[in-house]
Structure formats: C-alpha cells, structure tokens
Image (cartoon, grey):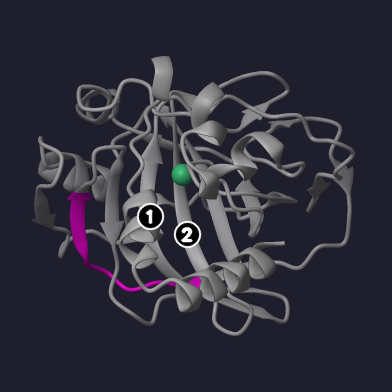
Amino acid sequence: MERRDFIRGLALLAACPLCVKTAYAAESVHWSYNGEEGPDHWGTLGKENSACSAGAQQSPVDIKGAIRADIPDLSVEWKKGGTIVNNGHTIQIKVPAGSMLRRGEKTYELVQYHFHAPSEHLVEGKHFPMEVHFVHKHAETGMLGVLGVFLVPGAVNRDFSTLAAAFPGKAGEEASAEAADPSGLLPSSLRYWAYEGSLTTPPCSEIVDWMVAMDPIEVDAADIGKFTALYSMNARPALITNRRYILSSS
Ligand SMILES: [Zn+2]
C-alpha cells in the first residue's frame, strides 16, 4: 500500500514538475493533539494522512488478550550521544549512526527516540505517565521497528535526568545529548509484546513492527514534570486492534 502510494507520488511528480512544491508543502500540514487539528481530524488534514482515518492497522492500541508465543529475544547495541530537538510535537533525540537492535534474524538501526505523555499504548485499559519510543529502521525493507518503554515515577534514572535537564524549551531549539545513553532507558528485562501497526503521528503509515516492553522503568517524578511542562498531552488515543494478534514473549 505504502509503496504503491510512493510510486504513484513519483509518477505524479514526473508528470507535473510544478507540483513538486505542492507535494512538499503537503508534508508540512499542521497537526496537533486537540481541536480542529487533533487526532480525530488527522486523516482529513492532507491526502498523505489518509491512513490516519482509513487505515486498518493503526497504533497505538490497548494491549490486552496477548497470545504467548515463541517470538525472538531482543538485543540492543546503542551508542551514547546525539542531539536533543524540541520539534513542536515532542522532545526527540537524534542519534549518531550505528546503533542497532536485533530481533532474531532482523536487524534495525536506531534513528531517533522521543517521548509521549501520557503513554500512547495502554495495558489492560491503563495508561502510564510516559512512554519512550525508540524508532529503528530496517536497512533493506525500510520497515520501522519501534520499541516502546513505559516510564513511571520512582527512583532517579540518571540518563533520563541528564536529558530532562537539557530539554530545549521552545519548538525548533536543539541541545546536545552527548552525555545521554539511551540504553539507560531500558528495563533490565526486555520481555515484550509485539504487533503490527503504524506511526502514531501523521501520516500514520502502516509500516511499523511494534515492540512494547512489559516492564516499565522508574524515573524521577520531577523529571516527568520537566517533560509535561512542555508537552502535557502528546498521546494519540488507542485505536481498535481490528483482528490483529498481539503476541507476548513470556
Ligand atoms: Zn512516538
């Protein structure tokens, strides 16, 4: 579906060089988490966002009724550092090349990680205060592998504190994430739920192998406050699973 749309887009550009401007302008359609530009309207804010309303495999979802299955263990080798960006929708850390996640035969490369408050995924109907999404790309297929980890208030997490102290206050601002190690935001066990879904922001493309860690990590409540002071609600509401299976690693 995605590829067909992409090819159709290329054909359109070839047929109409002057349309290029329009095509790029469409990419920057403004969206938000409430009101006229909120999640209920994303699908109609631009043609490229149609999956947000017409898609059948959308994310996030409420994780329940998971089926225990023999799914591959996860392992990560992530590098420290990067750049913290306030992109107007969240705080995102762009990472240096070469950080990998392995899931059985599949290898994905970490592109960026970012935060949501409250969590986007629910477990048995319940939200967590925050969720971090580690967005990886599969080199050959272009599919994304996104690992979600829930954040709950508790003991101080040094790496999250390092980031929180440097969160840029205004959209468009950047800061160094040199001292931050993304591996510090992982629970000790990588037991996880897996399902096939989408980006949780426009254009909601259905190209994501979702992995959601079962165990949350604890972070300082004051650091959660530093995020919610900037973004108090940047979570898309859960969508129906539509006969998709959610698999559980244990
Ligand atoms: Zn996300």
Left or right: 38 in relation to 24: right
Secondary structure beneath dot 2 equals strand
Q: Residue furthest top?
A: 35
Instruction: Mark yes or no: residue 120 visible.
Output: no
The response on whether ligand 1 sits within 8 Å of label 2 is yes
* Residue that label 2 marks: 135
Q: Residue 86: within the magenta?
A: no
Q: Would you say 82 lies left or right of 139 here? A: left
Mark 1 vs ligand 1: CB under 8 Å?
no
Residue that carries the numbered disc 1 in the rendered image: 113
Can residue 167 be seen at all in this image of the molecule?
A: yes
Q: Check if mark 2's residue and mark 1's residue have beta carbons within 8 Å.
A: yes
Q: Is 82 inside the magenta-drawn segment?
A: yes
Q: Which residues are magenta?
A: 76-85
Please report the residue visible at 68 percent of the width from the left and 41 percent of the height from the top: 58
Q: Give me the C-alpha separation between circle 2 and circle 1.
A: 6 Å
Number of numbered tags placed on the structure image: 2
Q: Quadrant of residue 207?
A: bottom right
Q: Which percent across, then down, holds residue 140?
A: 60, 85
Q: Is residue 8 above or below residue 170?
A: below
Please report the residue visible at 63 percent of the width from the left and 40 percent of the height from the top: 59
- When asked about the image quadrant of residue 183, the answer is bottom left
Whole-percent x, y for residue 217 in the image: 46, 40
| Whole-percent x, y for residue 250 in the image | 80, 50
Q: Residues within 10 Å of mark 2 (few under 14, many from 20)?
A: many
Amino acid bearing label 1: Tyr
Compared with residue 162, is residue 228 higher up or lower down, i.e. above or below? above
Is tag 2's residue or tag 1's residue first in the polypeptide sequence? 1
Report the disc number at residue 48: none
Of residues 42 and 183, the one nearer the viewer is 42
